[in-house]
Amino acid sequence: MIRRLFALMLIAGTSLVAQPALAADSYVFDNNHTEVQFQWTHFGFSTTSAQFRDVSGTLMFDENDVTKSSIDVTLNVQSLWTGREYFTAHLLSADFFNWLEYKTASFESTEVTKASGSDHFKVTGDLTIHGITKQTTFDVRINKVAQSPVSKAKTVGFEANTTVSRKAYGMGKYVPAVSDDVKITIRSEMNRKADVQ
């Protein structure tokens, strides 16, 4: 009897060990509720901003341990918009983004760490702009994780911020009159891929 009980316990233990860990869910950008904005100061008089309107990528989100999550983001550089056609064309020109040669900008995370506050994280990874890749860390706040009442999809809402040097990415024209530091902000809702397919 004892031997049979031991055998059953051994089988049960083996079964538990063999169970794979729950994988992170795959999420995709909801472009109707996503904004990638960057801003800089203009001769010290004002802060000017622009945004990219075409964003793609995947968030592998582990709700039980966010530090095991990862994200990749790709921006269509030609989707840049300033609200003024001439200014948009200037930023897309060889003076700055040179979109004819560099069609995309991207970010691929390499590490997610906990920051102060239960919903704050540091997301470090490779940011590629203008064909140049540098390690960058975003400060991320997760706003909400829940089912969207509109799409009915499981949704992650977040805001991410970082500041980069234009010169580091080969776009230093007019520095220092126009600030070298550029703040990048990503605000987004991302839907669980399985719910929107």
Image: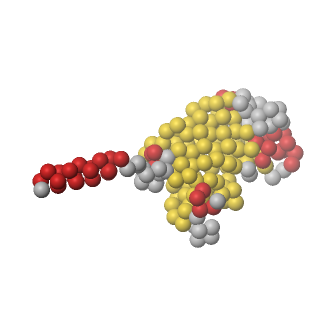
- Direction from residue 153 to residue 112 in the image, left or right: left
Q: Quadrant of residue 88?
A: top right
User: Camera-side residue: 182 or 109?
Assistant: 109
- Direction from residue 7 to residue 152 in the image, left or right: right
Residue 97 placement (x, y as % from top left): 77, 36
Q: Which residue sits at x=55%, y=43%?
A: 138
Residue 134 placement (x, y as % from top left): 61, 31
Residue sticking out furthest to the bottom: 149
| Image color mode | secondary structure
- Direction from residue 104 to residue 165 in the image, left or right: left
Name the quadrant of the C terminus: bottom right
User: Camera-side residue: 125 or 160?
Assistant: 125
Q: Which residue sits at x=58%, y=54%?
A: 27
User: Camera-side residue: 182 or 69?
Assistant: 69
Do we see residue 111 in this rendering? yes
Q: Quadrant of residue 41?
A: top right
Residue 60 placement (x, y as % from top left): 54, 48
User: In the rendered view, would you say 79 is above or below 195?
Assistant: above
Name the quadrant of the N terminus: bottom left
